[in-house]
Amino acid sequence: MDTWNWPLLDRYAGVSFGSVNRPPTPRLALKSQANGYALTQEQEAIVDCQTNMKINAVAGSGKTTTLIEYARRQKTGSRGLYLAFNRTVREQAQQAFARKGVRGVTIHTAHSLAYGRVIKQNSELLASGSYSAFDLANRMQKESLVVRCMPPTRRKAPWTAVAAHSLRLLDWYCNEPVTRIEDLNYNHLLRYDPLISRRFADYFGAVIQAGAIWLWNQMDERSLKVTHDYYLKKFQLLAPQLRYDYILFDEGQDASPTMLDVFSQQPHARRVIVGDSHQQIYGFRHAVNSLNQVDFAAYGLTQSFRFPPGIARQARRALSLKQHIHPFLGETYTPQAIEGMGVDDATILAEPTCLQALIGRTNLQLVSAAIDLLCIQEVIGSVYFEGNFDTYTFMENGAGLLDMVLLQQNRPREIKNPLLRSMGSLEELGDYIDQTGDGQMKTALELVLTYGDDLPHFIEQIRTAHLAQRFRPHADLIFSTVHRSKGLEYDQVTLCDDFIDQRKLADYIGLLNQQQKAEAGGQPNHQPVNPGSILEEINMLYVGLTRTKQGLSLPDSQYYLQRETLSV
């Protein structure tokens, strides 16, 4: 990659890398086992432990190396299970264990483990992974047991919005360790939704629940193709006994409550959970921080071999924002120790192989940035999006940006997505978004309204400039959401200006104070604020800035991270 991209990133971030105080090269104590050196004292304490334990490991602290060494030191003939967060992590772990010659460890994701025990020959997996609200609505309207639960309405029954809520309820059920859908209080899940969404779900509650139960039963009876969430939940309901001597649960800060329940029901095995509490960013998928859920011996990995002390200092400052939110949860904030052990070597950033990444909170923020840098400013020529660019232009429910443009242009016959094709206008789409609380679609609509008719041309330009995966290291700039960047690292990282900052935090605190007063006075809250979600916003900032090994460019809004003292 050419070094001319440096000024580009500085302009885009708003703060040049040169303005970041660079500390002197640190003196390394003990390097990780991965480099053939002795383990640190923290790592040695973990690999010698013979009881159940939970390990809080900061970014870049060598947790995989530690787990490999832990497995190596088990008795000959011991059988271990390593639960990886996703397929990519699973493949990386398989390679790492094989490279170190550690045998006797089976490596699975939660889904791959469940798949082999639940999916039978007569089961057919849904290719898209999940049902669309539009497809489910058409099916629900034909089922008398569901239809009879629909309350009277002045206009046409809003089956698509009802189906969206049924899918959301079923998704929650599949991620909770309860036996029946009826055991869940759907209103509790929606407590932080806009008032219009909560009122909709309250009025249509019976038919929403009936739709979720009907879909589950249809998959259970193999009348419909099954989803990934279905067979993982089914696995938990079977109360399986895993025949292993020890189980290693990775990325425990974002654990599925369903899989955590399976893990907890294995008292015959020694159990180890490892994760970083400050990297919990999947709460929107019902993930929980299992490190806070189990009463195991607590250990920590606080030395990061990824980045130098200057980055570690900014990571600590980012996390210190949490001290203003914990009181709203009745909790006490405890500062996180992070020691940067990486070598501070700016010459890496001038190398042709230097990997530069632009990291943002959302798919659509990254699409906007690519349009700006590639299509409008024309300051980069090639790009790579982590996870494939097409996944950034289509929301999880399959509703694409280009289809929204066609809806705006009143060209319904060309719309591919059935949900959007059923909409008469963008205004009708807006009503659907209000009723369902679909945040992704709301953000996509904002992007369409911003770029309008030019959007299809911009999307095609980005596709043309997008490199194949094998050429990823040669891209002028790599784009990634913070979620897709988990587990990855780059030489230089630029953060987009959509992360939480001091101003946004102050606004949140004001809203939380107003919320407390409203609740005390029994007044309705039209747009409640979830303090737990604010903590995840801070976690996203932490995850984003700790992807770098050397350079970090920050937007003006994050300049406070370079100051010695913070205030809100």
Image (cartoon, helix red, strand yellow):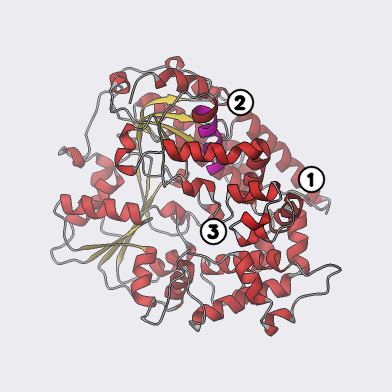
Q: Tell me which secondary structure the magenta stretch mostly adopts.
A: helix
- Nearest the viewer among 136 and 458 is 458
- Nearest the viewer among 496 and 198 is 496
- In this view, the mark in front (3 or 2): 3
Callout 1 touching callout 3 (CB < 8 Å): no
Residue type for callout 1: Lys
User: What percent of the width, then of the height, locates residue 80?
Assistant: 24, 64
- In this view, the mark in front (1 or 3): 3
Magenta stretch holds residue 231: no
Label 3: which secondary element? loop
Write down the residue under mark 1: 517
Horizontal side, residue 415 vs residue 260: left or right = right
In the rendered structure, which segment of residues is drawn in magenta? 360-373
Residue type for callout 2: Ser
Q: Is residue 334 visible?
A: no
Write down the residue under mark 2: 567
Label 2: which secondary element? loop
Callout 3 touching callout 2 (CB < 8 Å): no
Label disc, if present, on residue 286 of the rendered structure:
3
Label 1, label 3: how far apart the Cα atoms are: 28 Å
User: What percent of the width, then of the height, locates residue 547?
Assistant: 39, 36
Q: Is residue 473 visible?
A: yes
